[in-house]
Image (cartoon, helix red, strand yellow):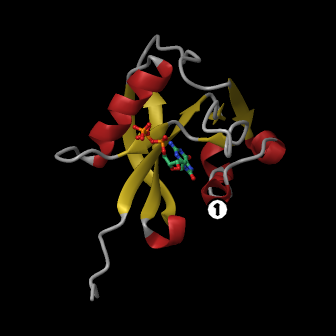
């Protein structure tokens, strides 16, 4: 009988903030979540720190170099505790412009537009923490 709980998989997301707006990305796949909005990011791989994973994912998904800052919001349990979402405030390095390499759409959202898109459910509590960071 297995009694131990596996360690939850860490999924990291980057709340990229520039000029008082945050970058939201619409997923292109898989079909169950296509069209829902998220922060760029993904699974932390073995031997990688969370900021390193975010730098890699932002490069892969958006073609940009980012600097990773402080956490925003808490740990969000997902998939019945099998994974956890952690989001970090991030900023684009000088001259970087996100490209839509993997997403269906990218949108910069100001404070009053934060809930104008259909975020993945796990993201909503994090998005609710963003307004003071967008002043
Ligand atoms: N990247 C990201 N994933 C999120 C967010 N919110 C949320 O529920 N998720 C979920 C969607 C996916 O089930 C999972 C992350 O999967 P992913 O497909 O982005 O990860 P990955 O790039 O490492 O994927 P792969 O290598 O397996 O293709 O976490 C979010 O804000 N950003």
Task: Looking at this view, name the residue that lies furthest to the front.
Answer: 1
Element under disc 1: helix
Which quadrant of the figure has residue 100?
top right
Write down the quadrant of residue 66 in the picture.
top left
Is 24 left, or right, of 50 in this rendering?
A: right
**Residue in the image at 32% along x and 39% along y:** 53
Question: Picture coordinates of residue 44 (x, y %)?
Answer: 32, 47
**Most foreground residue, 78 or 109:** 78
Q: Badge 1: few (under 14), some or many (20 or more) residues near its Cα, within 10 Å?
A: few
| Quadrant where the C terminus is found in the figure | top right
Query: Measuring 63% from the left and 51% from the top, which residue is drawn there?
Result: 130
User: Which residue sits at x=69%, y=24%?
Assistant: 105
Question: Disc 1 designates what residue?
Answer: 125
Q: Is residue 78 visible?
A: no
Residue ID at (46%, 71%): 81
Residue 113 left/right relative to 122:
right
> Residue 120: x and y, percent?
67, 51
Residue 74 visible in the displayed image: yes
Question: Where the N terminus falls, by quadrant?
Answer: bottom left
Position of 29 with respect to 91 (left or right) is right
Farthest residue to the top: give it.
95
Looking at the image, residue 40 lies above or below residue 84: above
């Amino acid at each position: 009988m297995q009694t131990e709980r596996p360690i939850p998989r860490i999924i990291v997301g980057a709340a990229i903030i520039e000029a008082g707006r945050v970058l939201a990305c619409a997923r292109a796949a898989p079909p169950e979540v296509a069209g829902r909005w998220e922060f760029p990011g993904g699974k932390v791989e073995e031997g990688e720190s969370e900021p390193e994973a975010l730098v890699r994912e932002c490069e892969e998904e958006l073609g940009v170099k980012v600097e990773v800052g402080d956490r925003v919001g808490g740990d969000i349990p997902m998939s019945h505790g099998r994974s956890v979402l952690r989001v970090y405030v991030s900023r684009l390095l000088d001259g970087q412009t996100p490209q839509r390499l993997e997403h269906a759409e990218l949108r910069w959202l100001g404070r009053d537009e934060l809930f104008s898109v259909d975020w993945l459910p796990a993201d909503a509590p994090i998005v609710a923490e963003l307004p003071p960071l967008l002043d």
